[in-house]
Amino acid sequence: AAAQAAVEAKACRLAASAQAAVKASEASQARRTAEAEVRRQAAAVQAAVDAETRCLAACAEAQETQAEECRLAAATQTAVRAEARLVASAQAAVKASEVRRQTAVAQAATEAERRRLVAAAQVALEAERRHLAAAAQAAVSAETRRPAAAA
């Protein structure tokens, strides 16, 4: 019975550990998803910047009368790049914040589940202890009555 209680306690600890690993894996997956989205958006912004750069190169080769348009395009490109950097930074911050939030939620859930499992294990162990104590008491009583009956 003591061995069974030890096995049950170990099973509870293993279950809690497995659930914690699942929660950590989910948080890790959410972080990887957020990072992939940030990389995808950064690549799209870079592609737009590269296209704008090619456009500016074509403008530079145009006639002198288009020089003012090229200067305006350069100023626009600078503004677009600055805005793209701001957008990318903001998106990265939002994604990182979401990953932190999801990690905190997963950790809280894991801790709550661990507490629940520990409480359940303690209740089960106490019930088993009571059962064993009652069985031992019954055996002692039976053993005490046996010599009296023999006499």
Image: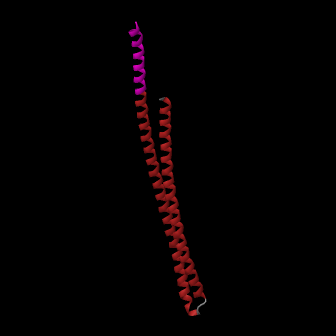
Q: Magenta span covers which residues?
A: 130-151
Vertically, is 43 above or below 51? above
Picture residue at 38% right of the left edge, 10% below the top: 149
Query: At which x and y percent is residue 43?
Result: 55, 71
**Color encoding of the figure:** secondary structure
Q: In which quarter of the image is residue 121?
A: top left
Q: Furthest-front residue in view?
A: 150
Would residue 134 appear left or right of 29 to someone viewing this image?
Answer: left
Query: At which x and y percent is residue 86?
Result: 50, 69
User: Does the magenta stretch mainly form a helix, a strand or a loop?
Assistant: helix
Q: Which of 8 and 24 is in front in this view?
A: 8
Question: Looking at the figure, which quarter contains the C terminus?
Answer: top left
Vertically, is 150 above or below 93? above
Query: At which x and y percent is residue 112?
Result: 43, 44
Q: Count numbered badges in the picture.
A: 0
Query: At which x and y percent is residue 96?
Result: 50, 59
